Image: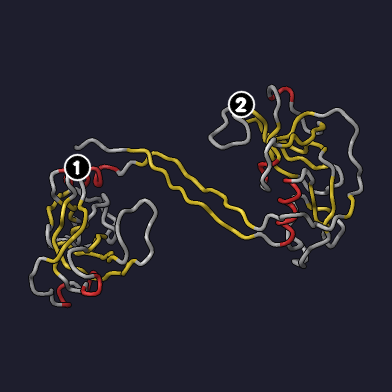
Amino acid sequence: MPDVLSAPLVVEFPFTRSLGPVQSAFLTGLRERTVLGVRADDGTVLVPPVEYDPVTANELGDLVEVAPTGTVTTWAWNPSPRRDQPLDTPFAWVLVRLDGAGTALLHALDAPGPDAVRTGMRVRIRWAATRTGAITDIACFEPYEGEPGPSEPAPHTGEFTDSVTGIVAPARLDYVHSPGRAQSAYIKALEERRTVGERCPSCRKVYVPPRGACPTCGVATAEQVEVGPRGTVTTFCIVNIKAKNLDIEVPYVYAHIALDGADLALHGRIAGIPYDQVRMGLRVEPVWSEGARHVDHYRPTGEPDADYDTYKELV
């Protein structure tokens, strides 16, 4: 049995969104060391503010200013901070109901240890030295033994100079991916410029890339079958938007390719032919990357197009 491969994998993208008047005022206020909430239809002051009442669904806009001090309503200790968390030393995640607010705000509390944290303790905001109009303008909370802020929030227009109108929130997932036995064998065969699939012992279909089990019959597969290297374009799309860090000029064609002997089409880029001449039934062959262990793209073989009846089940 071949060794099962594994490798770190990162999925990352920036999420860009525009802000309505309530969220714009809230984040701009943080930049100015001002915490704003919004009054709901029942009079409750919501912090962080929301644009619609969670009970009535009515649009909200009655902004008020609350104090930078508050009370911990619940907490959990974080002994091992991760990348990009508010603090790089152990801290507590806390829900804090700021003075004048009716709901709690989630953030980090800088404390020496879990014994120093308790429900009901008084805390205050520690502002970031540099503020840009984001929740990170609150660096964290810290213990506070001074006077509480006013219990009744003050009305606020929500108007600031140079208001924040949009944010970019990075989303990232780090994990270790293992392709499993079947796909490990598939990847290792690519190093030898071979493409292998696995045959289902029941329906006798050959799946490429192999999955370790037949998706139709649900039984395990183990019999390796070498397929291709040539194949047939079953369907395709024309890509007109250039991907970041991908050195391929647009437009280009990405296709489903049924390799000879396979009962499942795989993905591949088509090159060596004008994009507007790619068609269903086009016969193609792989072009391998120099020094790499994968197919760079597929190009036309010069053979006559395949008859539709030979690949229609794979479209």
Instruction: Assign a secondary structure to mark 2.
Output: loop
Instruction: Assign a secondary structure to mark 1.
Output: helix
Query: Contact (CB < 8 A) between labels 1 and 2?
Result: no
Total tally of numbered discs in the picture: 2
Residue at the spot x=72%, y=22% of the render? 115
Is tag 1's residue or tag 2's residue first in the polypeptide sequence?
2
Q: Is residue 238 left or right of residue 19?
A: left
What residue is pinned by disc 1? 188
What residue is pinned by disc 2? 89
Residue at the spot x=79%, y=47% of the render? 35
Residue at the spot x=20%, y=52% of the render? 295
Residue 253 place in picture, x, y as percent? 27, 66
* Residue furthest left as drawn: 303
Front label number (1 vs 2): 2
Q: Is residue 273 above or below residue 163?
A: below
Q: Nearer the viewer, residue 247 or 141?
A: 247
* Residue furthest front as drawn: 161
Q: Quadrant of residue 315?
A: bottom left
Residue 178 circle label = none
Q: Looking at the picture, which amino acid does disc 2 mark? A: Thr
Q: Is residue 210 left or right of residue 46?
A: left
Residue 72 place in picture, x, y as percent? 78, 36
Q: Residues within 10 Å of mark 1 (few under 14, many from 20)?
A: some
Q: Is residue 111 above or below residue 163?
A: above
